[in-house]
Image (cartoon, rainbow, N blue to C red):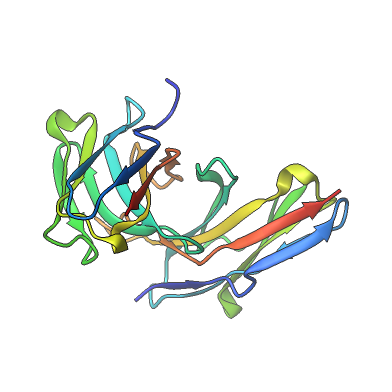
Amino acid sequence: AQKVTQAQTEISVVEKEDVTLDCVYETRDTTYYLFWYKQPPSGELVFLIRRNSFDEQNEISGRYSWNFQKSTSSFNFTITASQVVDSAVYFCALRRVIQGAQKLVFGQGTRLTINP
Amino acid sequence: DTGVSQDPRHKITKRGQNVTFRCDPISEHNRLYWYRQTLGQGPEFLTYFQNEAQLEKSRLLSDRFSAERPKGSFSTLEIQRTEQGDSAMYLCASSSGGNYGYTFGSGTRLTVV
């Protein structure tokens, strides 16, 4: 079975600080996809990134960066120089690659609050 | 195309009543998903359609729940004889296949009183 754990329930930092959101996953599959989504107060889940398990190269997109380590089954997300608009609930998710497998398995989410 | 639309945004119903939610996916997306999200938790998969065919259903989808996607366009999710435990946010998402992230709607928040 697949499982995603986000141990940090809530994080609160002051604006401009860097913050890392942790994600640990469990799967017996050798190939899979990992995702991060942002859920602002409006409720809509906003797609941030998808990562293939066979590609361990870290990725940076502006102030966002992702550190994927297959050896420790982790896919952590760092926001550099945080801003108040980054305040939201962030979800990590896992999806199998096998044909027909479409569902996303989400973690419990981390509520991030950026204080001015 | 303005994304995935869900209607209504909020629904308050009395226990025992039936409710129906609608989801309009992105027009070129052939895949549609329903998820349920309770307070403080991540979304949980309910069911998945490819065109009009319902290909996967979660065990969470009890016999009081039914979903349809006639003609492979919009979808409806009906809950019969609602219970207080059904109170949650019901999220719809769509995708065009491949392996990209899904586009989610803003959800329908159901409160059963």
Q: Is residue B105 left or right of residue B64?
A: right
How many dots with numbers?
A: 0
Where is residue A17 drawn, in percent x and y? Answer: 87, 57
Where is residue A96 drawn, in percent x and y? Answer: 36, 63
Res A79 → quadrant: bottom right
The residue under the point 34% across, 34% down is B8
Q: Is residue A107 left or right of residue A23?
A: left
Q: Quadrant of the N terminus of chain B?
A: top left
Can you say whether A31 is above or below A62 in the image?
Answer: below
Where is residue A93 drawn, in percent x and y? Answer: 48, 61
Q: Nearer the viewer, residue A116 or A58?
A: A116
Can you say whether A79 is above or below B77 in the image?
Answer: below
The residue under the point 15% across, 54% down is B81
The residue under the point 42% across, 66% down is A31
Q: Is residue B1 visible?
A: yes
Where is residue B33 drawn, in percent x and y? Answer: 30, 46
Q: Nearer the viewer, residue A20 or A28?
A: A20
Q: Nearer the viewer, residue B85 or A80?
A: B85
Q: Is residue A62 visible?
A: no
Q: Quadrant of the C terminus of chain B?
A: bottom left
Q: Is residue A41 left or right of residue A98?
A: right
Residue at the top extreme?
Answer: B1
Q: Is residue A54 left or right of residue B87?
A: right
